[in-house]
Image (spheres, grey):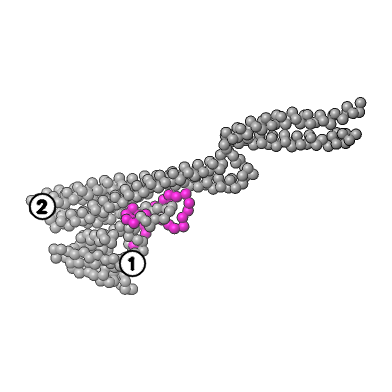
Amino acid sequence: MMALASGFRVNTNTTSFHTYRSYSSSQAGLEQNIERLSSGLRINRAADDSAGQAISQRMKNQATGMRQAVRNSQQATNYLQTAEGGLNQIHGILSRMRELAVQSSSDGLNTNDRFSIELEYAQLKDEVSRIANSTTYNNMTLINGDRAKGIARTETTPGTADISATEIKSFSVASNVATGDAFEFTSVSTNSITLTNKTTGEEQILHQPDGAGFAENDVLNFDDLGITMTLGAGYDGIADNDDGFTITQGDFVTMQVGADNDAAHARADSSDADHSAVTENRITLNISDATAKGLGISDSQVSDLADSQRAINALDSAIEKVNDERGNIGALQNRFEFAVSNLQSSLQNTEASRSTILDADFALEAAGMAKNQILTQSGTAMLAQANQISQNVLSLLK
């Protein structure tokens, strides 16, 4: 009777319950193994690993942003290559124009000879502007000044007139000149002009070495300050310590080259010698004006000896400007190549880290599935045996 009280209970089959619990655990483990092996993922829902799921999603967003940043950088490279191609053609034309100016500077030519040279010179000058205006990328003009900095003519003394187009016909601003910098003519005479950057305190003096004085269409290249200008007929109306101009921002193209937003607006102008000013994720492309007017040669001509001499000086300045712009574009292209390389490396590392968190270990899951299959099969058999225990009590009633 004691054996019956301790081992033969009909209403509660404890052995069966224990066996069923073990069987259910093995069955759940087997289902999880199958799910992970079929999906290839260790985390198929947040319940599998809530922290791991959150981390993997953040990494996924980061990797997606990096892929797009790579495409942005490659697009920027194509943009710069298109601009550099246009500048290369303009450089060739300027070289030919200088050759014509040198030819026209010879006293051995008659009027008809110079007229023929002037015809070709004028056509080439028009072609420079045509190329600058027609060099486009995705319907955006690149080298006609739309992406360059400009100037706002100002006066120091309130109520006086701004610098007029009869005084300074045109301005060209290098990309490394900061937007908002204020310039002023601090000294103007027949044979010298001093321009001062009132923001930085830098100044540069240009002299007319032959004592003939400056004249209309003379190109003044304040290369230390990044300013080039063409004088008009009334340049002598510029007042000392009164007339000036402020640098304005052009319609720049900004490229996102990082996966994250950056509150600080990074700027690496195509002519910026100090690339250390750039922050992480945004680069602004600023390409100077390469039209005939922007290069300071729109009013140049080779119709006589004096004009030819002035044209040579203007063309030398224009060629130097184009060379500088091409060099800086090349440097920026190299920078984008390094940006792409860095992004691809970061993307690879991010994907590897995400895989460690998210992906299933197939060897481990296969071993686990084999174990759980055996436990499930044996659990099924043992559950059947456990369910038979209560049947044994009937033998006591015979």
Instruction: Examine the rendered structure and indicate whether residue 91 appears above or below residue 374.
Output: below
Say which quadrant the N terminus sits in. top right
The image quadrant of residue 70 is top left
Residue 300 — which label?
Answer: none
Q: Where is residue 377 in the image (x, y as percent from the top left)?
A: 70, 29
Inspect the magenta stretch and tell me whether residue 272 lies in it.
Answer: yes
Residue for badge 2:
106
Magenta range is 247-274
User: Mark 2: which amino acid?
Assistant: Ser
Residue drawn at point x = 43 percent, y = 43 percent = 344
Q: Residue at x 50, y 47 (%)?
A: 62
Crowd around label 1: few <14 · some 14–19 · many ≥20 (10 Å) = few
User: How many numbered badges does the structure rendering display?
Assistant: 2
User: Residue 134: where, in percent of width, then height?
Assistant: 32, 47
Q: Earlier in the sequence, mark 2 or mark 1?
A: 2
- 153 horizontally vs 307: left or right: right
* Circle on res. 199: 1
Q: Which element type, helix, strand or loop, lies under badge 2?
A: loop
Residue closest to the eye, 363 or 81: 363
Percent across and percent down for residue 191 are 18, 67
Residue projecting furthest to the top: 398
| Residue 251 seen anywhere in this rendered image of the structure | no
Residue 266 in the image, given as x and y percentages of width and height = 41, 56
